Amino acid sequence: MLAAILLSALAMTLIVAVRYLLTSGGFAFATRIVRPSLYDGLTPQIRKEVYWSLASAAIYGVPAGVVAWGWQELGWTRIYTDLAAYPLWYLPLSLFIYLFAHDTWFYWTHRWMHRPKWFRIAHAVHHASRPPTAWAAMSFHPIEALTGAIVIPVLVFIVPVHIAVLGLILAIMTLMGVTNHMGWEMFPRWLVHSRVGNWLITASHHQRHHDEYRCNYGLYFRFWDRLCKTDRGLAKPS
Amino acid sequence: MQNRPRAGKALLTCLSLALLGAPASQLAAQGAPRAGGAQVVIEVTNLRNEDGVVRACMTRDARRFPRCQDSAQGYRTVVPAGEAATLRFTNVAPGTYAIALLHDENDNGRADRVLGMMPREGFGFSRDAPVNMGPPDFEDAAIEVGSGDLHQTIRMRYML
């Protein structure tokens, strides 16, 4: 049994690592085409970003692997596979609940990690990327990585979610983690500068967090930033 | 699926419910019972439409579950979905079996999947064994067939 748990944790770590290398590599490649000199001179920094990201892959992979094992072997979690188990309208609702819960957790732990003591211990690694690149998506100190790694593995015990929606949540998490750091806005102006865009976080918003530190703490939505008056709007387009 | 390194299964990639190919001949549904063998009757519920066929297989060989491929110790049948409310295996030798059903809506002989992972066609197993990261283990779906007739109700489930 222990061997099976270890194997699951190892497999999940590899999946997370490969997922990181493919998505960050893909958007780094896209950056080279769209903004050819954006990462010039950043090679030593990128090397560190990849190093910390791969370390984080293990921290993300272990809890996910243990939960995946428990789901398969012991029936843990409230992940469901039968589409008819809940009404169809619950699919988009569960997506929103997961994103909002993750966003809330992220906002408050992120603000906590900007307190001077904890910034030095846990969050300085992430802000050492100046400016961040597509490779910085998982460039976290292990303490910060741990705060991020437990969110989904805990939520699946509390909030029912269809396996396909869970896959979508993980895809959104991965995509936004990479693109919010890559240094250019890929979403169209009509979306970013719109009433909907006023509540969504994309690269333009998160870039400003990395420029100015003490604002724009959110993950997916600007709800908490706006409520707590920490939203300073978008960075100037690069 | 041989040896099933249980935890190494990537997300749902092992959902190989393919129940490939073989014709219905091995034991035709509705066959007259003969002396010595039991009859296993399966009530199939929750079929979502009458498209294609229902492929059913039943095996004693844990390594060949749920596909029952090349199984000398198994029975299989293929029935049009519109007529699949009741399936029968007749003249079944006593033993421990597990049953797998696939609602092969496009009748292409395999469980079609999205991105090679998540089945888009319905499935069902004896004892209503759950599907999580992959198909259930043989033990979770195992039923005992003795000399008497056996009834099982299997609910079809659709992930997408």
Image: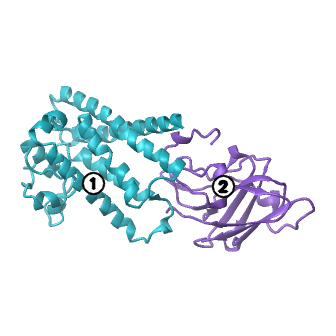
Disc 1: which residue: A102
Instruction: Name the mark on residue A18.
Output: none
Q: Residue furthest right?
A: B35
Q: How many marks are shown on the rendered structure?
A: 2
Residue A163 visible in the shown view: yes
Query: Which residue is pictured at 60% across the width and 40% down the height?
Result: B4
Where is residue B37, by image quadrant?
bottom right
Nearest the viewer among B28 and B66 is B66
Residue B58 placement, left or right of B146:
left
Residue A209 drawn at (x, y percent): 11, 46
Kind of residue at disc 2: Ala
Residue A238 placement, left or right of B157:
left
User: Please, is residue A51 above or below residue B107 in the view?
Assistant: above
Which corner quadrant holds the N terminus of chain A? Answer: top right
The hue in which chain B appears in the rendered picture of the protein: purple
Residue A131 visible in the shown view: no
- Identify the subunit bearing mark 2: B
Mark 2 residue crowding within 10 angstroms, few (<14) / some (14–19) / many (20+):
many
Chain depicted in cyan: A
Residue B86 placement, left or right of A101:
right
Disc 2: which residue: B141
User: Please, is residue B5 above or below residue B135 in the view?
Assistant: above
